Amino acid sequence: MEPPNLYPVKLYVYDLSKGLARRLSPIMLGKQLEGIWHTSIVVHKDEFFFGSGGISSCPPGGTLLGPPDSVVDVGSTEVTEEIFLEYLSSLGESLFRGEAYNLFEHNCNTFSNEVAQFLTGRKIPSYITDLPSEVLSTPFGQALRPFLDSIQIQPPGGSTVGRPNGQS
Amino acid sequence: MPHIISRTPRMAQSGRPSCLPAGKNTASSVTRVIVKTPGKQEDFMIADDTSVRQFKEKLSAHFKCQVDQLVLVFMGRLLKDHDILSQRGILDGHTIHLVIKSKHSSRSLAHSSRKPSTDEPCHQDKNTKGNSSGVHQPAGANHSPVESAVSAEPGVPRMHTQGLEVLSLERIAQILENPGIQQLLSNTDFMRRLISEHPDMQQLMQPNPEVSHIFDDSDVLWQTLELARNLAVIQEILQIQQPAQNLEHPSDPQSHVGSETTRGEDKALSQNSADFNDQMLSSSHDPFGGNLFTALLGGQVPEPVQSSPPSPPPPQEWQEQLPQLPTARVIYASSRDLSSTASASATPSKANQTSRANTAASSTYGWSHTCDVEQLTGSPALPSIELTQQPQAEDKDATTSLDSSDQKLEDDLRLLDEQTGSQIAGSMTQVLLNNPSLAAQMMLCMSMPQLSEQWRQQLPALPQQTQLSDMLTALANPKTSQAILQIEQGLQLLATEAPVLLPWVAPYLWGLGWLPAPSCSYPDTVPGAWDVPDMEEPKGPESCHKSGTVLQSLQSRDGDPSHLLQAPEIRFSKQMESLHAMGFGNHQANLQALIATEGDTSAAVHKLRRSQGS
């Protein structure tokens, strides 16, 4: 039997604050944050991410965020693109609808983590997934929680994945 | 045959920690595996030596689908039917991912158009995204190219918009460096009013009353403005803005640093920007047109052809076209708007073409003149609220200090983009028209730094609404701005060629019959005391009339500077009298205090008291 194809899976990490968090977090939060992380999974030459508009995809680095600040190698997967898209469609209809987006609980990194585990069985680095709890553990984060909860992020440049006719 | 038990409550069974069973074991130990499907997960108890096939059969019964539809993934590896689960390393508590393929094959991504050729063969038997129910193979191939074309198109305007945005944002950054705008931004109260009065802002605030809370907190607003003034921070924000359309946004009262972006802000701004960006992209009008500042910027770029679009229609038209702007964006846009006016002002004086002799040119010309003056000359800007007087004041100063300004103007000119400046001017005009006090205050602020208290005292009462409307309308007259520009250009040229002749301009003004003939004196860089407010600017839309007024003001300036060139004693004579009347007898001390406070009597009083008390 021929060896199965292995597709590399990468995690694109973007710092939404473009360095501001690293500089200002000690002052504002009282703890050092290296960045405000937005992540996306890149596999099969496509970038997939979750935002307030649901699951979106684009060519790698194709959002307005530009190229990622860092790339993490998650591993490799045998999952073909076909299966993966099916999987994403199911996710987009169930767990990762656009309206399910929540900055703290259910954000782009939640999605990336989920997908990474599906594709490779491994999780994404913890400093990314721990970010919400890090912020919420500060008085600043707690104070701003109602406001922050209402924030929705959707990096422009992607097209929706999931529903056949493009509706989310 | 070991049987498979499904859906039993979690029992910590199968105590075997790690080692894989060698083939079939005697003891039928059961392993609990977690099967995870998108949206849910369930536990399954299976025997160690279950094959994948058997497992699938069980799952298919459970999930009510066919075995062929099931795809099992473990650690990124697809599980083949003949595999034994335990041989794949699936142990107790491990998670297996399950994907149930839809009955009608799979879908393709919308933007997979970039690889249509390679996908075509594979997708022959696939449906496209646009069609998931009941359409069979033949349709799939047909849809792919259509989808490719469609998906390619959105990419193009998006890229285009992106390009425009990048250009303008850089320029905005440069424009924000303008000290005049910085000063304006430092006036919290004004900024708050300006932003609140903006129609788009009000549109935004109606459904979102909490947005207005931002402005109620002066602290927050101040921090925002601090941020706006800090160019370096803005540049960073601009970079964020490009992808995520982030804007400086009031953060929180706790922040000690001038409202730098927090994570929350970022997200908020992203959200706002994302919304706005969607609107932008969907807007049929020029993609960045909704953005006030680019419109303004663009208007100042020299155009060979001086167009004279009718001024009244554009404001309304632009008003309608302007999409709803999120809070932060409006703030930023307003800031940028103001900043762009500053440098925009430079252009009119420089560029011969200048203008789209249109609202943009005229309005911004008027408004930003004060700023520009500061920028150019460092001299006190014109105090006049009356816009008509501003241009001529600017003329005056420009003529007298062209050298440094020339270069700067050139630079400013180059900075400006080729968007429709009138758009922003239109909306700004509306705002100002509706709020004459706001306009007056803006003039005040823009010229505040240099001007200080002196002329502030002498400022007349805020012009009546009608006056201001007339002024703005007059300014909106393209011919008006043309005339002003020509005057300014002429004066500039004269100043360059023969500064000594500048005073002789006065006779020409007299010749127009508008002006009395006061004692001629050297034009002075410091307008200083501004007696012009006494001069009621006659109302009238005609441009020549307006020019006359400008010249008239210019002439009056002629008279004043000489006055001002004299000793501060004379400049501050009124204030000195006041101080004397208050009981400060020390003439020298009074004079010093007045000089230090530039004629602000009350400030001088404080100063004197402090010095006396100490």
Image: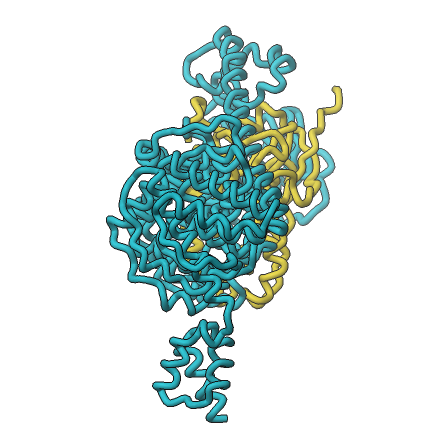
Chain colours: A yellow, B cyan
- Residue under the point 34% across and 30% down: B310
* Residue B92 seen anywhere in this rendered image of the structure: no
- Residue under the point 32% across and 51% down: B197
Query: Between residues A55 and B10, which one lies in front from this camera angle?
Result: A55
Above or below B328: residue B34? above
Q: Position of residue B368 (x, y in %)?
A: 46, 49
Which residue, as the protein is rendered here, is positioned at the far bottom? B613
Q: Position of residue A33 (x, y in %)?
A: 61, 59
Figure quadrant of residue A32: bottom right
Query: Between residues B85 and A90, which one lies in front from this camera angle?
Result: A90
* Residue B491 seen anywhere in this rendered image of the structure: yes
Query: Between residues B537 and B48, which one lies in front from this camera angle?
Result: B537
Query: Between residues B9 and A83, which one lies in front from this camera angle?
Result: A83
Locate the N terminus of chain B and report the quarter of the image it occupies: top right
- Residue under the point 43% across and 22% down: A165
Above or below B365: residue B606? below
Q: Position of residue B432 (x, y in %)?
A: 33, 48
Q: Left or right: where does residue B370 sit relative to residue B190? A: right
- Residue under the point 50% across and 85% down: B588
Q: Position of residue B150 (x, y in %)?
A: 49, 18
Which residue, as the protein is rendered here, is positioned at the far top? B138
How many numbered circles does the render carry? 0
Q: Left or right: where does residue B150 sit relative to residue B122? A: left
